[in-house]
Image (cartoon, rainbow, N blue to C red):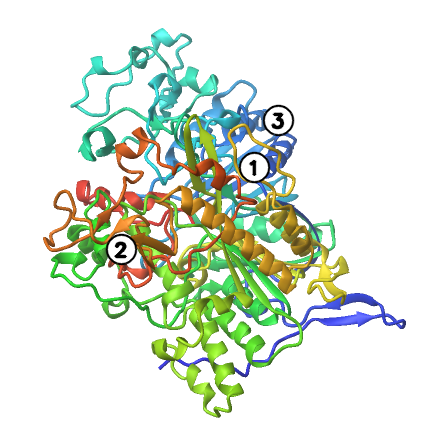
Amino acid sequence: MATMELDQTSRSTSIIAGTDGTFKTTVTSGLWIDDDHVYAPKRDGNGLHAFVTGKAYFADLIQKMENASSEICIAGWQINWDALLAPGKRLYDVLLQAARKKGMKIYVMPWDDTRPIRTYDVQTIRVLKTINGEPGVAPDTVTAITSPSFNLTNKAYFSHHQKTILIDRRYAYVGGIDVAYGRYDDERFTLKCDEDGREVMNRYNPCIPPLLAVSFSEMVEPKGLMQRHRPSSPGLAMPRLPSSPSMKPPSLPPEVFVTNDWDKLKRGKWQAPYQEAEVMDLMTNGAAIDSAAPFTLDPSRQARMPWQDMHVRMEGPSVADILSNFVDRWHASGGPRLPSPPPAQQFAAAGSAMVQVLRSAPAGLRKKENRRDGKSAAVCEDHIKQAMCKLIEKADHFIYIENQFFGGKMGKPVHDEPGGHGKGSSQALSPAAKFINAQKHGLTDSARLILRQKDHNDAATLYDPPTNPICEALIRRITRAILNAEPQPFHVYITLPVHPEGDFFTTASVAVQIYWTMQTISFGTNSLLNGIRRALRARQLRDQGDKNYKRIFADTNQDMHKELEHIPMEACFDYVTLLNLRNWAKLGERYVTEQVYVHTKLMIVDDRYALFGSANINDRSLNGEGDSEIALLVADQKNSTADLCGDGVQRPVRDFARKLRMDIWRKLFGIGLKPSAVGGVKPADQLLSAIDKPACPASWRAIQKQAEENAAAYEAVFDYIPRSWQYFASGSKTTSSVIPNWDPKKTPPFKETEDKDVKGYPATSLPFEMSFWTSLRHSANAKSELQKVKGFISALPIHWSEGEKNNFPYPTSLVASKDKASDRIDSAYSTDTNQRDLKESDA
């Protein structure tokens, strides 16, 4: 039986006032992590500059790299040599310029990805190492290695997920932005995929199939750079042969036989995409064929997926800890010895921020690092999780969370038990899930067996729900506000992606992540919303004189459906606001929409404290024995006051956290946006007051109202986007399937599953079908509806997939965090089971 403790006390912030009673400063209490295994202590005197767009971050990074005098260190989950950093500038171009400085050393360390997850790590290393042979560059200026997972168990499931860059051992960049495809973005979140010179994989949208074929003359194949002889003329180049025997040379463009990869690299061309053994050919109704032709998004009809994230540049003593983390991991990964980092005391103060560098690190990594301080390396580090829980407990007025994932302990999952007698892994799935499983990237029985063979978990717990305590901690804090009738308001804002990267219509590993996210938010017996409903019901019973009101909390694994019928889901919105992000555009005659992908890993509390870095809210990022992560816990010593609650009372805030949140909210609300030639959202100027007063009830109600209006407009125009409600058959209102346009009465036109009695089919075409792209897929009232949209916020559909059993049998430790590459798992195993390992994609 799982229970929830109600009598936890809150650590508080002490306010120091002058003799005249005016506010002077605040003192943190219990904020910092101080156990024996923490990677670094809190350090004072740090200067921080936050970037809330990839464009601003990369502009600063270019300037610092090009002006570097001695050393550049880059670590990332994904590092792409041709990532777009500015129009006409690739990472390669920036590092080449830096490498020509006398005495310069450049160290690059991407995660050593494991098939079928592929991040172009080897290709990046091949290309960047060629800088050593360039005129004016000393030999061995660039050293690049991959960094493998060091987990002691389930190594194939996990990754290095940290995203850090160091310049001259003075500047450290930390946050959620990899130097990778798709990250270059600004406050406009444009859907125009070829804007700013985006080409090939920088036209990023893993949720839809790319339709525009790209000539090989535009592609760089890094294998071609391994030749020591560089032809001076394209005519001297060796031909690039087709990758498949079934593709005959005459079917390829003639330039493929005359163009040299060296020349293409120098002319600013781009990485050639991986050529899979199987490529989805839309023109043959999804048949698997051999193809050697690379594809990219078609700007005439396809939208890129915009990117929401943040990163920080830091100077000061805590740079020593970021540097130590890089050097430790570099040596653990077998890199040549680097100079030892100087002690933090040798770093001059550069600002007013108190910073603690925190990590998630498996015991195997700690052992490999051979920590210099002599502390035991027998246990993992889970201090980012600890910090999140402390911040939630400390919160007085509001919490703002922006994260790529939201999965955690939520009692037991709740769903209907579907009928039918299917075979294999799809036996108990919902009809919509069976449809997904019948597509190209369904979870086959053979793939499931291979996954199980690679898992070291106890079979009894293999498919258990997530266990990290973040959702539970939020429920506990909100419950305190409800039952204690706190005099000031308390509210939690959470901004999440609409869905994980990938095509959830055809990809089981994406659909199962949606399942666990929705169980954590809405449906689980102690989901975030059901946990709040428990507290509201308990208060209701207490106010009615029921002395046994605490029975509501006795067993959080018990389905309290009957009790909670008294509390509608919407009653929770006095305590929590749930947001997605979305934009729209008009490409020719076609109206299109796409989610703004939330990749941030950020928590801000009371505009006083900020925690950010690479860690998602899921087990693999937080529980220690998963992905390696890094984060900064920040409390700025520059203080001021603000009317947070809208009641005229000035409350203490800290400059860094408050400015960061306000900058992000201005961006998400579209403040200052100028009209675009392709359409898109208008500014939500009426929310300016909400930016200043985040804990004011009028603020969250205004934000929720605009988000709901935006969602209604999008749903009226695009029938295939996620929603809470759908109208089919008699026109009655029912909760939406995971496939939003799923018609439960429609008979499949052909056999989609092994269950002959399964009913239901998408009412209209979906993005993986060619018919979707050859006809317009918006309603007739698109123009009038989309003109109503203000800001990028959209209400998260809390009833989406309600009742559906969509828990495809992936090990929970694996799907607690997946990304775009996850859609290749099953086809990869079915074609090359002896060669491939399983590893996560970006989080």
Q: Identify residue for label 2.
A: 730
Residue shown at 11% from the left, 57% from the top: 423
The image quadrant that residue 144 belongs to is: top left
Secondary structure at numbered mark 2: loop
Q: Are marks 3 and 1 in contact (CB under 8 Å)?
A: no
Residue shown at 32% from the left, 43% from the top: 503
Identified by mark 1, the residue type is Arg
Q: Nearer the viewer, residue 726 or 318?
A: 726
Badge nearest the viewer, 3 or 1: 1
Instruction: Describe residue 434's horizontal placement relative to residue 643 as left or right.
Output: left
Q: Earlier in the sequence, mark 3 or mark 2?
A: 3
| C-alpha span from label 3 to label 1 | 36 Å
Can you give x and y, in whole percent of width and height, for residue 279 in the image?
24, 33
Q: Is residue 538 above or below residue 793?
A: below
Can you give x and y, in whole percent of width and height, for residue 694 in the image?
64, 59
Secondary structure at numbered mark 1: loop
**Image quadrant containing the N terminus:** bottom left
Q: Earlier in the sequence, mark 3 or mark 1?
A: 3
Q: Identify residue for label 3.
A: 101
Residue occupying the far right of the picture: 20
Q: Identify residue for label 1.
A: 188
Residue occupying the far front of the picture: 730
Instruction: Describe residue 329's horizontal placement relative to residue 753 as left or right.
Output: right
How crowded pointer 2 is (Cα within 10 Å; few <14, some 14-19, many 20+) is rated as: few
| C-alpha span from label 3 to label 2 | 72 Å
Identified by mark 3, the residue type is Lys
